[in-house]
Amino acid sequence: MDQLFYIKTFGCQMNKHDSGFISQILLNKGYKQTDSIDDAHIILINTCTVRQKAEEKALTLIGRLAILKRKKPYMITGVIGCVAQEKGVDLFKRFPYLDLVLGPRNIYHIDEFLYKIDKERKQISCLDLTCEFTSFPKYNGYLNGKVKSFIKIMEGCDNFCSYCIVPFVRGREISLTAKQIIDEAKYLVSQGIKEITLIGQNVNSYNAKNEALPTFPGLLKQLDSIAGLKRLRFTTSHPKDISDELIGSFGELESLCPHIHLPVQSGSDNLLKLMNRGYTRDKYLGLIEHLRRTRPDITVTSDIIVGFPGETEKDFEDSLRLIEEIEFDNLFSFKYSDRPGTKALQLPGRIGEKEKQRRLSILQERQREITLRKNKLLEGTIQEILVEGPGKRGDDQLTGRTLGNKVVNFSSKVNLKGQLVKVNIIKGFQNSLLGEL
Ligand code: 5AD
Ligand code: SF4
């Protein structure tokens, strides 16, 4: 009988990528993937701990596995990812029916752990943050029908922003070699992939620590010359590490899409300092100005935190003024959440939940107006779309993204999946655009 595995993924693109990685390892070993948790023999929960709420969601699902395991004692259940790294073997105490606890740096040999559990029927954990990561396991057919893909070019983070748990659960920065990345990109293109997004906690520090070449802009240049690769993107960038050379890439490299996700976190210099971000409000504004001068059609998105310890009304207003001044195309905003082990835990000036929520609502309302206004500005323009497949509404609706990464839906009787097409934008909405071929 086929061994069926099921993976539930919480969190960011790194986790999504890791789950894809695990799927391909297991498919290569002869396991089959299922979308039904009830049918699975192996259940893996890939967890996120960036905020308290994300962690709670994962823990709730892990708790629910108890019933399944009672029904099928021979089933294997595993917790992987950032909560696994943070809580470690304590998870076995709280959820005794778990078989596997694996940190995000230890997924690359998951097949061996599963094999061992199956044979020896004992609990296994691996939480080694010094493990190297490897190139992608290629499973034939996995990319069939896909138009876009990620490449993880670096892992870990050395920045220790004072609110952030990531450096503790993903370990120190480590980069894949340029050869591994180029080979992977060529392979993806040979499989029909048209758009690649390079991912890492801070892609700008690619190769920075080991002082190896190429640096990040050099890597982009090498990738840009790959025939058949239509679009190149990257995320996430840290403002303190953006070089003039990187900004210049937006004006030079043909495949590099004019979109940057550049988390600002706060518009107040006091808070940026307390957050250990390594730049000022002015420096950030200067970067945006430079990016827009180099590539006027560039779209800019960002992350921001409200209610960080010590955030005064004036600090908050500085953030509001910043988003109005910059007019981000989109903004991901979060209420500050205490994370174990981080420096911010010791800071005075805790903000109450109600006040955090008030600030978040004000900020989100402002940004909604800005996003809508910017989307409406695109009405009447012609945009190049990479067609990804059928839209949510089915029928003959197709969906894709602009160079600036905005979702466009449009009608077409012909299946144009994987093609670059020009559409006229007829309407701008809050979360998408409506186009016409
Ligand atoms: N509380 C709230 N938001 C956080 N982020 C990271 N850590 C925290 C925290 N402790 C946000 C940051 C980051 C995004 C991925 O999550 O804005 O850019
Ligand atoms: Fe966290 Fe800062 Fe590293 Fe981003 S750069 S992962 S916010 S510590």
Image (cartoon, rainbow, N blue to C red):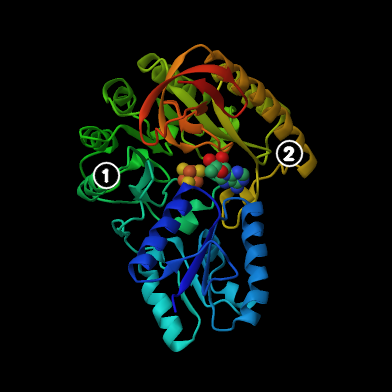
- Residue 76, given in percent of the width and then of the height, sits at 52, 77
Amino acid type for the residue under numbered disc 1: Ala
Left of 87 or right of it: where is 298? left
Residue 36 visible within the image = yes
- Residue 348, given in percent of the width and then of the height, sits at 69, 44
Report the disc number at residue 185: 1
Which quadrant contains ligand 1? top right
Amino acid type for the residue under numbered disc 2: Lys
- Residue 391, given in percent of the width and then of the height, sits at 53, 36
Vertical arrangement, residue 4 with respect to residue 9, above or below: below
Q: Is mark 2 on a helix, strand or loop?
A: helix
Residue visible at 36% across and 55% down?
142
Report the disc number at residue 100: none
- Residue 236, given in percent of the width and then of the height, sits at 43, 39
Query: Which residue in the structure is indicated by mark 2?
Result: 356
Residue visible at 42% across and 87% down?
119
Left of 321 or right of it: where is 183? left
Hey, which quadrant is residue 367 in on the image? top right
